[in-house]
Image (spheres, rainbow, N blue to C red):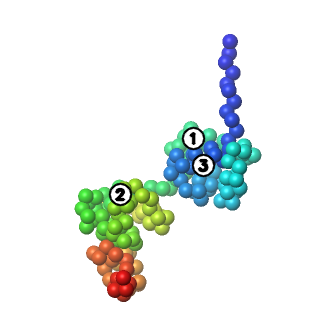
């Protein structure tokens, strides 16, 4: 006797959100990957168990579940790998702070990122942009640090890399 396949329940918003959470995606990214706008995502969220009307969204979710390596993410922003690739020593506190400062953040941010806390979107995009450069190691690091120094000068922040801070002298005095 042939066994009938039990039909899978129709995809609903709770399935989309479970997939989003499983892959560590934020709502804008997940909704974009599934072809939904933020507003549509929020509408579906109002009734999480209601079946989705759009078959293509259900099919896309099934595809991403079956072939997660084909989720079109450009997220390649791994801070520890980035530090290593640019020649920073992940075990050296000065290098950690210097790298975070080179990315436009206070030096202490490095510790949060290495503990797995998410990067801000601008920092994530900056790392992704540098990862796409066709140069390696020290050359890439020199370019990043040069841009950081230029930005520091334009903001009146002297030497943000060695100070591990983007606060100007004036704002440090106010605190």
Is residue 68 visible to us here?
yes
Residue placed under numbered mark 2 in the picture? 114
Residue beneath the point at 68% across and 15% down: 2
Label whose residue precedes the other's in the sequence (1 or 3): 3
Residue beneath the point at 57% across and 46% down: 19
In whole angstroms, how far apart are the C-alphas of marks 1 and 3?
Answer: 13 Å
- The secondary structure type at the circle numbered 1 is helix
Residue beneath the point at 34% across and 75% down: 165
Q: Is residue 9 left or right of residue 133?
A: right
Extreme-right residue of the structure: 53
Q: Nearer the viewer, mark 1 or mark 3?
A: 3
Residue placed under numbered mark 1 in the picture? 65
Residue 17 numbered tag:
3
Q: Residues within 10 Å of mark 2 (few under 14, many from 20)?
A: some
Labels 2 & 1 near each other (Cβ < 8 A): no
Labels 1 & 3 near each other (Cβ < 8 A): no
In this view, 137 is above or below 1: below
In whole angstroms, how far apart are the C-alphas of marks 2 and 1?
Answer: 28 Å
Is residue 132 visible to us here?
no
- The secondary structure type at the circle numbered 2 is helix
- Front one among 95 and 15: 15
Residue 136 percent across, percent down from the top left:
33, 61
The quadrant where residue 95 appears = bottom left
Quadrant placement of the N terminus: top right
Q: Residues within 10 Å of mark 1 (few under 14, many from 20)?
A: few
Q: Is residue 69 left or right of residue 143?
A: right
In whole angstroms, how far apart are the C-alphas of marks 3 and 2?
Answer: 26 Å
- Front one among 129 and 29: 29
Extreme-front residue of the structure: 175
Label whose residue precedes the other's in the sequence (3 or 2): 3
Residue 58 percent across, percent down from the top left:
67, 43
Q: Residues within 10 Å of mark 3 (few under 14, many from 20)?
A: some
């Amino acid at each position: 006797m042939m066994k009938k396949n039990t039909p899978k329940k129709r995809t609903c918003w709770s399935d989309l959100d479970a997939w989003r959470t499983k892959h560590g995606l934020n709502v804008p990214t997940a909704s974009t990957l599934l072809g939904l706008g933020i507003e549509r995502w929020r509408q579906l969220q109002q009734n999480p168990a209601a079946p989705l009307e759009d078959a293509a969204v259900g099919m896309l979710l099934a595809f991403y579940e079956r072939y997660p390596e084909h989720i079109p993410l450009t997220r390649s922003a791994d801070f520890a790998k980035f530090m290593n690739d640019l020649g920073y020593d992940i075990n050296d506190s000065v290098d950690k702070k210097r790298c975070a400062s080179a990315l436009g953040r206070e030096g202490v941010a490095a510790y949060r990122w290495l503990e797995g806390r998410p990067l801000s979107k601008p920092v994530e995009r900056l790392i992704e942009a540098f990862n796409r450069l066709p140069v390696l190691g020290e050359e890439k690091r020199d370019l990043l640090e040069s841009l950081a120094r230029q930005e520091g000068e334009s903001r009146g922040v002297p030497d943000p890399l060695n100070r591990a801070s983007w606060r100007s002298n004036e704002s440090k005095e106010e605190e």
